[in-house]
Image: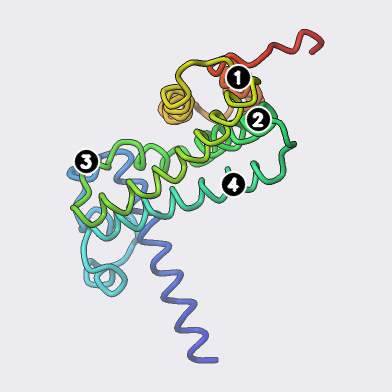
């Protein structure tokens, strides 16, 4: 029981630090945030942070790796649950992509803006995860082109444009606005299909 309690406290302590770091990195930027800022936000001492993380850089890497791992898992689940056509799959992945960027805005903004703040090791990790996410979009789009369902002559550029749509949403979307995350996801799925020149469904 004592060991289980200790593990729970450690996990809870890490989460408190990460929550405070996300808040400060999103508002002040990585370089504008000190370990003391994070400690105040987490209501703990700076020494307590070092019990969980050896440096601010490791905190940033942890946040960005988690963000990308979570969105990859979310978009992959959407892909696996979608129909067999490239249009259905791209629509499903795009909806998941937009839902992530509207419901976890602060983390998404950090992931999009702070890659320049990573050291060499963190940069390699994050770029590898970003490439994995891009491949998911690109594979669907390239198959759609190969099967004649998408008419874009630029599948690689189309995948990047679609990905950047999601990044941009995180910068302006606000909860309680005109559209819910689900409504916005539906609209952006239509925009994604337009980007790859998929056939328009006139019946809907």
Residue bearing the label numbered 1 = 150
| Mark 2–mark 1 distance (CA, rounded to whole Å) | 8 Å
| Mark 3–mark 1 distance (CA, rounded to whole Å) | 34 Å
| Mark 3–mark 4 distance (CA, rounded to whole Å) | 26 Å
The colour mode here is rainbow
The disc at residue 116 is 3
Residue bearing the label numbered 2 = 86
Pair 4/2: label in front: 2
Position of 124 with respect to 13 (left or right) is left
Q: Earlier in the sequence, mark 4 or mark 2?
A: 4
Mark 3: give few (<14), some (14-19) or many (20+) Cα within 10 Å. Answer: few
Q: Where's residue 133, x and y in %? A: 47, 42
Q: Earlier in the sequence, mark 4 or mark 1?
A: 4
Residue bearing the label numbered 4 = 76
Q: At 79% from the left edge and 13% from the top edge, which residue is drawn?
A: 204
| Mark 4–mark 1 distance (CA, rounded to whole Å) | 21 Å
Mark 2: give few (<14), some (14-19) or many (20+) Cα within 10 Å. Answer: many
169 is higher (above) or lower (below) than 128: above
Q: Which of marks 3 and 2 is nearer the N terminus?
A: 2
């Amino acid at each position: 029981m004592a060991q289980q309690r200790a593990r729970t406290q450690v996990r809870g302590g890490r989460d408190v630090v990460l929550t405070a770091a996300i808040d400060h990195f999103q508002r002040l930027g990585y370089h504008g945030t000190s370990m003391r800022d994070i400690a105040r936000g987490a209501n703990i001492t700076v020494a307590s942070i070092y019990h969980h993380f050896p440096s601010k850089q490791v905190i940033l890497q942890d946040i960005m790796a988690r963000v990308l791992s979570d969105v990859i898992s979310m978009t992959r689940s959407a892909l696996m649950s979608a129909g067999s056509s490239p249009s259905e799959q791209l629509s499903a992945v795009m909806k998941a992509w937009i839902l992530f960027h509207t419901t976890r805005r602060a983390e998404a903004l950090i992931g999009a803006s702070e890659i320049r703040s990573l050291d060499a090791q963190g940069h390699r990790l994050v770029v590898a995860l970003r490439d994995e996410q891009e491949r998911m979009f690109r594979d669907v789009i390239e198959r759609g082109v190969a099967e004649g369902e998408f008419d874009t002559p630029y599948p690689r550029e189309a995948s990047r444009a679609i990905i950047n749509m999601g990044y941009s949403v995180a910068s302006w979307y606000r909860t309680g606005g005109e559209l819910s995350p689900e409504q916005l996801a539906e609209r952006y799925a239509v925009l994604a299909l337009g980007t790859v020149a998929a056939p328009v469904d006139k019946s809907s």
